[in-house]
Amino acid sequence: MSQVDVNGLPALQPLNDGGDPGRTIGQRLLNVLPWAALESIAITLLGILVSMVLFGVFVLLAGHSPFEVYELMYKGAFGTSFAWGNTLTRAAPLLLTGLCTALPARLGMVIIGGEGALVMGGLSAAAVATAVSGASPAVTISCMFLAGSLVGGLWIAAAGALKQFRGVNETICSLLLIYIAVAILNHMVDKGPMWDPSSLNNPSSHFIGDANRIGKLPGIDVHWGLVIGIVACLICWVLMDRTTLGFAASIVGGNARAAKMAGLSIASITLIVSFLAGAAAGIAGVTEVAAVHGRANANLAVGYGYTGILVAFLARHNPLAIIPVAVLIGGISAGGGRLQKSLMMPDATALVFQGILFLVVLVFETLYGRLKFLQRREAKS
Amino acid sequence: MTEDSLGLWSVPLAMVAGAIRVSTPFIFVSLGETLTERSGRINLGLEGTLVMGAMAGYAISYQTSVALGAPGGLAMAVSPWIGVIAAGLAGAVFGILHAWLCSKPRVNDVAVGIALMLFGAGLAFYLGKPYIKPTAPRLQAIPFGFWSDNTKVQNALEVNALFLVGCVLAPFILWGLRNTRYGMILRTVGESADAARAMGYSVNGVRMIATAAGGFLAGIGGSFLSLYYPGSWNEGLSSGQGLMAVALVIFARWNPMKCLYASLLFGAAGAIAPALQSVGVHSGRYLFTAAPYVFTLVIMIFTSSSSRTMAGIPAELTAAR
């Protein structure tokens, strides 16, 4: 049984052409290429291709033409500017919930409770918006983001702390916290302290006010959450790949005993990283409240947290790779909506596709080091 | 009818009833996961298996009742049990899938479990879409409360046969693990894969059987949800019970009898919210719904330790962490 490869894309191979005599220019060029990164990308693409074939068979068994299904999905995801807007709107929270699983994975922790942090982040943002009503929009929005990231961060940091200090299984713990978060959400907005009595059919908190909503990006039907998500991924990539914290996290994930010998505080690294992870998911909740719904209600818990797990694993826990993967998965769910409308297929069709994709990509881990044409030529000599 | 004659006593009574009524899925999933983890592998996908079992059981029960010509007495009696078997088989298929994927080098069992959790739920929602409306024949309860005149006591002591099966299965599995050759092979694989290999046993083969058996039991646990309590198929049916059962195995220290006791405890915790509602406590009902999750979490906090290895944990599980 191997550990999850938590290091994302393997490190680029050092430039080692060193003017070695007896090598042609072509061979030297081959050495310059980042083979490990290429292997990772190739295996992921191969996995996507194989899962498309498997899903095609599934669709065929369900009595539809795979080609028609894929054409419709493509049109529904990337065919028009409206479709792009739909895809990117779904991708925005996935960027952040993907980080919630990807960052702790660097430490060897499998956190799958992003949905809970998202719900708590959104709920606290709505609470703050009500509490500071009357303040200027700039203040209100800042407070919402602050509260959302703080509460979401503490939510996952709690799982990290329990893992660190009590040895509680963080996977199960973070998942249990989802159900607790959803119960708190329902308690607050359904005839509870935050209930807006005018929300009859769909119990919700009070509307945050039009001035406090974050708007759409110019030129496309996507809210600013997309930019926030992309920036968060970039920041996390820098943090994890270019700073001492990220380096320390990798050491802790690789060998906790070595990290202790090197004088690293495992506890504080665990807490910081799990806090950042939860903060990312919490911000996803804030953007859902501030940009999409305008209030906190059951619509917060529609599964972005769960899909974020898939995004993180597909991206091999690399914050940069999360960006294209989130767009792809956002596209699959947008395309799934199109299937539902055009072919009357169940709305769970996209979930089946995502499940197949998840399984295939995990199993393709086994191909690492086995694809001969992707091994560095130099290794043979 | 003596509706209020029990007064506040109806709360503990409802919790006993809840323990009997709600615990069955916990019993089956946790016994199955005990077998799987004793072989040295974790299957977190049992949540998906549970949902899949619930869907398959309900769908097959409905289909066979239609085929047998409902509403005959025969169909009502036989169809649900065919559904239960079908649910078990669906679960076993998921178990085999998990075991097969994990037998590949570099493939992580926790990650595959998470993937199967999402895939199982997605597939069950897809295939189960046509079965949300129709009514399938359910499992019948055995009335053990016949001696009492009180309807509440009678209701509380309506026991499903699957619950009794679970109660018998737990000591049977314990006996099997301790006293049979197969139990010994399973424990050897879970304690030291190398030793098992040296003795000539196929580690992957044993794990395959253990995971398939775990999936079979989890599938049956799922069929209880759709065929008895709450007794219909819908997408919010499970809400984490498969996962709580996995946490419960840790609490029960991988011991089948303790799994049974812990399941009863979890069942009682799950019955708090409906029990309080039945006596008119409605405020904070959502928070009481969260009671089983908080309860599970608290138990995990108190039974885990960062410094010591847990007593009873199969050694291969520790090695995997």
Image (cartoon, coloured by chain):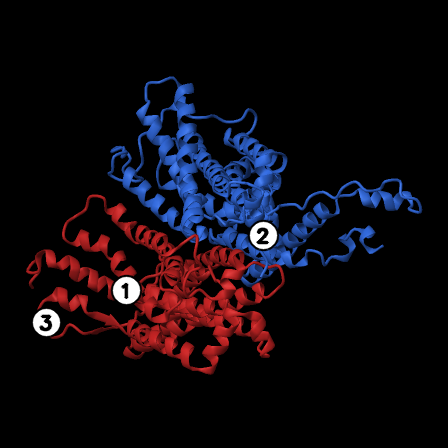
Chain colours: A blue, B red
Q: Which residue is mark 1?
A: B264
State which quadrant residue B4 falls in.
Answer: bottom left
Disc 3 and disc 2 on one polypeptide chain: no
Disc 1 and disc 3 on one polypeptide chain: yes
Q: Which residue is mark 3?
A: B148
User: Disc 3 is attached to a residue of which chain?
Assistant: B
Label 2, label 1: how far apart the Cα atoms are: 47 Å
Residue lying at 54% horizontally and 52% vertically, measured from the top left: A354
* Kind of residue sitting beneath label 2: Val
Local SS, label 3: loop
The mark lying in front, picked from 2 and 1, is 1
Residue toward you, A206 or B293: B293
Q: Is residue A335 visible?
A: no
Residue lying at 64% horizontally and 57% vertically, measured from the top left: A364
Specify whether B3 is left or right of A10: left
Q: Residue A158, how many percent across, how many down?
A: 40, 43
* Kind of residue sitting beneath label 1: Leu
Label 3, label 2: how far apart the Cα atoms are: 60 Å
- How many other residues sit within 10 Å of disc 3, few (<14), some (14-19) or many (≥20)? few
Q: Which residue is mark 2?
A: A69
